[in-house]
Amino acid sequence: MVSTDVAHLLRELAPQVLVALVRRHGGFDACEDAVQEALLAAAVQWPVDGLPDNPKGWLITTASRRRIEMWRSESARRRREETVAALAPPDPGPAPDVDDSLTLLLLCCHPALTQPSQVALTLRAVGGLTTAEIARAFLVPESTVAQRISRAKQRIKAAGAGFRLPPPAERAERTAAVLHVLYLVFNEGYTASSGPALQRVELAAEAIRLTRQLRALLPGDGEVAGLLALMLLTDARRPARTGPDGALVPLPEQDRSAWDAAAIAEGVALISETLAHAPVGPYQLQAAIAAVHDEAPRAEDTDWPQVLALYNHLQVLAPGPMVTLNRTVAVAEVHGPRAALEQLTAAAADPALAGHHRLHAVRAHLLEDAGDPDAALVAFRLAARTTLSVPEQRYLEARADRLAHRRA
């Protein structure tokens, strides 16, 4: 079994090794395959033999050898590739002490790609998410994401993109897609879309790490600062989100003394400074909402009118199904569950939300608050059946069981 430390190291090194291989050999698609095989070999060998003195160099060497083998197997290019293999020794020598994760992140967002393809490819190559995880993050079929990734690789190959930081003007054009990638990686880490654990801490930590790097690269970008603040303010609650048995603890019931006070202070300071000096963007608004929640000493102290006002701005600036759903929760706190249920009925017409478990879960909570336990029980059961997260499923089933016992 791969230890957490080894898994974290492999995730950190994977994009750096991929960049080194592409720079050396060319061919994004083939290099990614070679890197994946090297990572698999490391996951098997390192726990048994111990970490090599130079893990990054080991991975580059192993992946380079596999890449040369792949070259040699292409009969139409055999002669040229054998010549290259003879000129390029399998051992690439000492690996440079440079973290190329951010370089790969920016270059996967090549202007030749559509933004959905940029996001999907970067999540796969840098974030390490599976095709299924990306599909759930996008609320689209898995086959759609697979096609996007395949087409993206082909277009990068056709464009002859070099693996180096793009010029500042082009870098700015890619920032929106990069931010969206980091946002989705963080969300998958903070609330895993499937599996036995509520959180994938390594993914959230990687998203924060890369966003800090992006902030250092683009210190004057308000949305980069806003996204970093949002991540810090959200991740600060992580210690209180699960109980000792791993069960989900909803926000109103969390022990706020367990929240990361340092992360909250950093996030609040960052978003306060950014809102005062930069044009307001969607990530800044979401960070401001997170700050309102984090600064409330108790759940009942939350300034819900302010939260609703911020969601109103966000809905105008960056409308979307999840914004609509989250705004509905704020409407319930300010205007009552019946008003929120009316808006939820309208929101359910959106195909992206119609079968989503969060829609059913929000409806269940609103129905319970509105005094309709029978309908709430049905909605909780439906939400439990449609989520792929085991902790969320258990929480929703427990809520349904509680209502069932009251009826008995």
Image (spheres, rainbow, N blue to C red):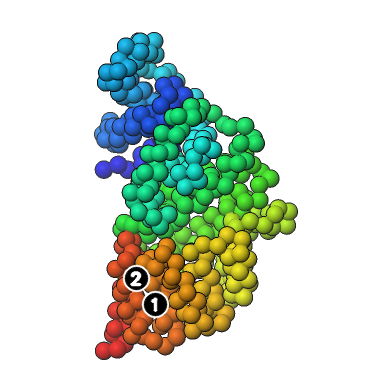
Quarter of the image that includes the C terminus: bottom left
| N-terminal label among 2 and 1 | 1
Q: Nearer the viewer, residue 285 or 52?
A: 285
Residue neighbourhood size for the residue with mark 1, other residues' Cα within 10 Å, grouped as few (<14), some (14–19), many (≥20): many
Please name the amino acid that badge 1 sits on.
Answer: Ala
Q: Mark 2 points at which residue?
A: 383
What residue did someone put label 1 on?
364
On the question of residue 375 being in view, the answer is yes
Q: Do the residues labelled 2 and 1 touch (CB within 8 Å)?
A: yes
* Count of numbered circles in the view: 2
- Above-or-below relation of 249 to 149: below
Instruction: Give the residue at x 45% y 76%.
Output: 345
The residue positioned 41% from the left and 26% from the top of the image is: 27
For badge 2, the amino acid type reads Ala
- Quarter occupied by the N terminus: top left
> Closest to the observer: 44 or 368?
368
Q: Position of residue 332 (x, y in %)?
A: 52, 79
Q: Is residue 48 left or right of residue 81?
A: left
